[in-house]
Image (cartoon, helix red, strand yellow):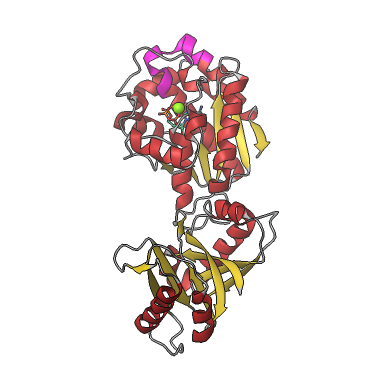
Amino acid sequence: MNKVILIRFNEIHLKGGNKKYFTKLLINNIKDALSGVNFKLENIQNRLVLRDYEDEQEIINRLKCVFGVHSISVAVELDNNPEIIKDYVKTIKIASTFKCDVNRADKSFPIKSNDFAAQLGEIVLDNNSHAKVDIHKPQITINVDIRESGKTYIFSDLIYAYSGLPLGENRDGLLLLSGGIDSPVAGFCMAKRGLRQDILHFDSFPYTSKLAKEKVMTLAKLIKPFIGAKYIYVCSMTKLQEEFHVNCKTEYAINLLRRAMIRVANAVCKKYKYKTIVTGESLGQVASQTIESLTSTNAVASFPVMRPLISFNKDEIIALAKEINTYETSILPYEDCCTVFLPKNPVIKPKIEEAEREENKIDYTALLNYVIENIEVIKL
Ligand code: ATP
Ligand code: MG
């Protein structure tokens, strides 16, 4: 009798001819997530079986961050033999309501699912005077999964992961990560659809502090297991912001800054071959996230901008931030570059021509090149 961890996946089943490719991706991602841990992984039909491991909880915690994984169960592995299974079920201790669920994927198994479930239920009742059958709302379900591989898995709990698609091989996305609540969640959401991402952060040192940068580094490390990031690019916007502040209309400061962020992101994408930019914008959340503001920033984007939170309410974003453990760090009170030189009345419906007119008041290209050339690349 072996104790194993069963790993189930769901969306991959819909991939038809590409199922093999996605399963391989998932297996590679699981191996990456478990680096430094001893284990063996076997691919049986529609399940992965992880065996020969030690630290069960650590493995489960790491598996929960792997997209494509639907659920995880710690199971006992037996041969597909009714007597062996019955002997094991005799040893199960239960003092509550229960039911037995049998899934007979191995059609050569001699007893039909419902009949076998009834037989196993009888065995549990015979061996546990306080156990009681409840088909509808049992406190414990004894799942008996009889697979085509010749092995049966018996388990009670399913630990749910986040499903979705496995991260792709290439880091195709560039996540614009601020120190706020939204952008880590945006990275998580896109990773759930298989987008592996690196990170771009803007600071305004010395107006923003070293602590603000440390906070972003902490956030980056917290989301790294989800988004598969390897690098964080840190770009100082100070010079550009100072020029905007002195020369341009104050109410356009944020719009100009956001357009500059996208232009820097364009340059990083082009140089390092990212295919898309990801932000944590949500429609109407602030002045810089109205349709007109988003139109103005989109106008300078050379790559598609993904905004997975566009339809999320703040409380929905906060709930997800708590779920992925970034919330407590995000609410630490350090300033962001968007709060430096913050105008009292930012324009709510910026016009592209007006933004361009403001940009023409300064030596824009030279300044942009300066901030791009001074980007710091940090390995995570
Ligand atoms: P967040 O909680 O993510 O900071 P927010 O509500 O504060 O969002 P904005 O400051 O307008 O919104 O930023 C919108 C998006 O722009 C962010 O979600 C992020 O993707 C990007 N962004 C903003 N500031 C920065 C920054 N300093 N560095 C990198 N990206 C940023
Ligand atoms: Mg922000």
Percent coordinates x, y for residue 127 in the rendering: 46, 74
The answer to whether any part of residue 337 appears in the image is yes
Q: Is residue 44 above or below residue 29?
A: below
Q: Position of residue 68 (x, y in %)?
A: 48, 59
Residue lying furthest front = 129
Vertical arrangement, residue 380 with respect to residue 113, above or below: above
Q: Residue at x 36, y 80 (%)?
A: 118
Q: Is residue 165 above or below residue 45?
A: above
Q: Is residue 182 left or right of residue 211?
A: left
Number of residue marks: 0
Which quarter of the rendered image does ligand 1 occupy?
top left
* Viewer-side residue, 355 vs 139: 139
Quarter that holds the C terminus: top right
Q: Residue at x 70, y 60 (%)?
A: 38
In percent of width and height, residue 323 lies at 45, 42
* Secondary structure, magenta segment, majority class: helix
Front one among 56 and 314: 56
Q: Residue at x 39, y 38 (%)?
A: 319
- Residue at image position (54%, 25%) is 365
Percent position (x, y) of residue 368? Answer: 55, 25
Q: Is residue 17 above or below residue 335?
A: below
Q: Is residue 244 magenta?
A: yes
Q: Quadrant of residue 285?
A: top left
Q: Is residue 45 visible?
A: no
Residue 13 within the segment the image draws in magenta: no
Q: Camera-side residue: 302 or 339?
A: 339
Q: Which residues are magenta?
A: 242-255
Among the 4 quarters of the image, the one containing residue 297? top left
Task: Give the quadrant of the N terminus.
Answer: bottom right
